[in-house]
Amino acid sequence: MKNLVLVAHGSRRQASNEEVKVLAAKVEKHLPQGFSGVKVAFLELASPSIEAAIDSCYEEGASELLVLPYFLSEGTHVAKDVPSEVAKAMDKWPDRKIEIVPHIGSLDSMIDLIISVCPTTEV
């Protein structure tokens, strides 16, 4: 069983955290075969933590996780903090597989997404 863990920064503004949870629920409806669910995790300021979300996945029977940093650029959180938190979880679950995939902002599909919001002009 494979799960996706969507890692966001976290906010003091609860509505922002809820936005990420709503997105995760929408993503979960479109997961490819082989995935059983999406969990949300926050780096700071909100719950669950990355460690708690990973623990929850494994306690529910997952054998493999993909961790997706929901960040637009590769700042310190993406380059160091998320991998550090995932490494802590890997120490607890050495027999399980965890892969950190590229952050959202680095994906080529972001180009099409940005272009899609630009209105076309007729000449």
Image: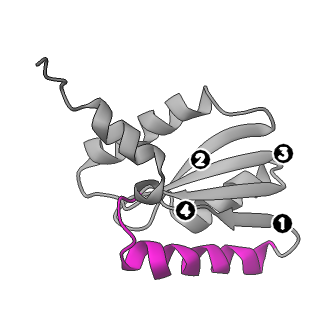
Q: Distance between the residues labelled 2 and 4?
A: 17 Å
What span is in magenta? 71-93
Residue type, mark 4 in image: Pro
Residue type, mark 3 in image: Met
Q: How far apart are marks 2 and 1 (CA)?
A: 17 Å
- Where disc 2 sits, the SS reads strand
Please say whether residue 73 is one of the residues in the magenta stretch: yes
- Of the residues under marks 2 and 4, which one precedes in the sequence? 2
Q: Residues within 10 Å of mark 3 (few under 14, many from 20)?
A: some
- Of the residues under marks 2 and 1, which one precedes in the sequence? 2
Q: How far apart are marks 2 and 3 (CA)?
A: 13 Å
- The residue under label 4 is 102
- The residue under label 3 is 1
- The residue under label 1 is 96
Q: How far apart are marks 3 and 4 (CA)?
A: 21 Å
Residue type, mark 2 in image: Lys
